Amino acid sequence: MTFCVKPWCACLALSSYLLLTAGCSKQTPAQATAAAEATTAAAAVLPSPEPSSPSAGNLPKPNVNGSHVLQYVRQVVAFGPRPPVSTAHLKLEEFILSKLKGLDVEQDRFTAQTPVGKFPINNIIAKFPGKKDGIIVVAGHYDTLYSQPKSFVGANDGGSSTAVLLELADQLRGKPLDGYSIWLLWTDGEEAFVKWTDKDSVYGARHLAAKWQQDGTAKKIKAFILVDMIGDAELDIVKDTFSTPWLSDLVYKAASNLGYQSHFYQWSTGIDDDHIPFSKVGIPVVDLIDFTYGYNNVFWHTPEDTVDKLSAQSLAITTDVVLETIRLVDQR
Ligand SMILES: [Zn+2]
């Protein structure tokens, strides 16, 4: 993902209560890092989240084991750098599919034309049927940066989103849902191959959004919840101004219900990410992303994006807030 760097949107988008210069320059704010440190310290003494109320039916309680999610990150990172067409990417696809055995799984395979040639891309979708008519999609990318094939393992950027979705699959397995159907979507080709532009980015998301618009699926989707870079030990999820306002507000309500609001929306900007193509076809979207990964975002897209920068607690908070958001969407 990236900040939107077009002057018309980046500068207008910075209506945050922390005044930033970051959006226009792709730099990240020191202020936000300080805020994240403060909020992390505060969260350490928070009690376990109260069970959701009113009843969430048989939706899993937002009380996941963050160590288990972190273990998934370790397993994903162990494959090495995972850009499209790499052996590690293929192994990760097999790993994800092995965890989805017995579930209703769809693979959306196609060939993407990139600035450096044609690449096979594969979005993976696991479908959990619900009683209500409609779908909630939870998505995150599993590819890593192509331009850093040798040294970039993407623990946070690619690894954390993959792991949160794997955890959600474990949580949802074998529990017929009273609410909307839930589709877990591992997107591919999120990263640019050369330089982030509208055409060189979010390949899998653009392909699937077009497909879902064409086959009528888009109309059935009540909410599209994207997670990206959400394992940072200093968790500070930005308020993305390109997200759908009511859904963005619902995420904050979910975080507040669980006592995690200090990790959310300390600052805001427009984020260009996998959710945008789905927004363009009329689907309500929200992007949960922490774009202050280390001081001034220094770990982002560098070999420093390693597991030691993440925490089980941050992964648990994000996964729990996603589950609570699903519950709130079900009740709307
Ligand atoms: Zn990235």
Image: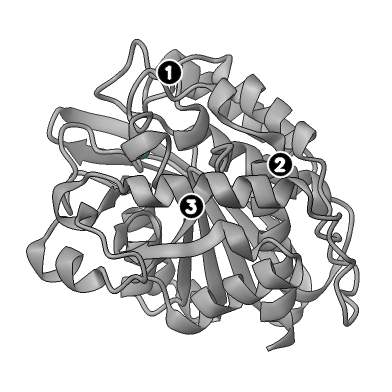
Number of other residues with Cα within 10 Å of mark 3, as a class: few under 14, some 14 to 19, many 20 or more = some
State which tag comes first along the sequence, 2 or 3: 3
Viewer-side residue, 181 vs 285? 285
Where does the image place residue 21, in percent across and percent down from the top left?
A: 19, 56
Residue sitting at the far bottom? 332
Please state the quadrant of the image where ligand 1 appears: top left
Please give the label number shown on residue 35.
3
In terms of secondary structure, where does tag 2 sit? helix
Type of amino acid at the residue the image marks with label 3: Ala
Question: Residue at position x 74%, y 85% from top?
Answer: 331
Where does the image place residue 28, in percent across and percent down from the top left?
A: 29, 46
Give the residue at mark 1.
81
Task: Give the distance between the C-alpha atoms of the residues marked 3 and 1, in whole angstroms.
Answer: 31 Å
Disc 2 + disc 3, Cβ < 8 Å: no
Type of amino acid at the residue the image marks with label 2: Gln
State which tag comes first along the sequence, 3 or 1: 3
Q: Is residue 8 left or right of residue 3?
A: left
Give the residue at mark 2.
313
| On-image quarter of the C terminus | bottom right
Q: Visible in this render: residue 172?
A: yes
State which tag comes first along the sequence, 1 or 2: 1
